[in-house]
Image: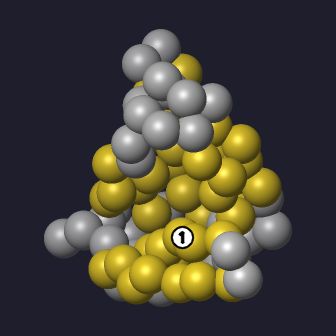
């Protein structure tokens, strides 16, 4: 299974909220730069040659060109 996404808008900022129903759900990120806020749960985030684990409250700034994938480590992340 994969994540569910919903577009959001806050003033001039636009983005998406992703929900992961079950541990093991995945989301492949784009190569565009992005600011990611982990609102709940925990994730293994990986790319070519690197991996990290992040928890609720983490803020991650992905530079342009860095492909990445999120894998939920717990349900309802």
Q: Is residue 77 visible?
A: no
Which residue occupies the foreground of this view, 53 or 29? 29
Work out whether 65 lies above or below 32: above
Q: Looking at the image, what colour scheme do you see?
A: secondary structure
Figure check: 9 above or below 70: below
Residue lying furthest front: 12
Would residue 1 be visible to someone looking at this image?
yes
The residue that label 1 is drawn on is 15
Residue 18 appears at what percent x and percent y?
45, 75
* Residue 66 percent coordinates (x, y): 50, 26
Judge left or right: residue 64 versus residue 56: left
How many numbered marks does the figure carry?
1
Name the residue rendered at 32%, 72% in the picture: 3
On-image quarter of the N terminus: bottom left
Residue pushed farthest top? 49
Of the pair 43 and 33, the residue shown nearer to us: 33
Q: Residue at x 42, y 34 (%)?
A: 31
């Amino acid at each position: 299974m994969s994540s569910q996404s919903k577009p959001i808008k806050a003033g001039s900022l636009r983005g998406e909220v992703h929900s992961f129903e079950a541990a093991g759900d995945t989301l492949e990120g784009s190569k565009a730069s992005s600011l990611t806020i982990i609102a709940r749960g925990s994730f293994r985030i990986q790319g070519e040659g690197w991996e990290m684990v992040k928890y609720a409250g983490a803020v991650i700034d992905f530079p342009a060109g860095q492909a990445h994938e999120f894998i939920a480590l717990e349900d309802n992340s």
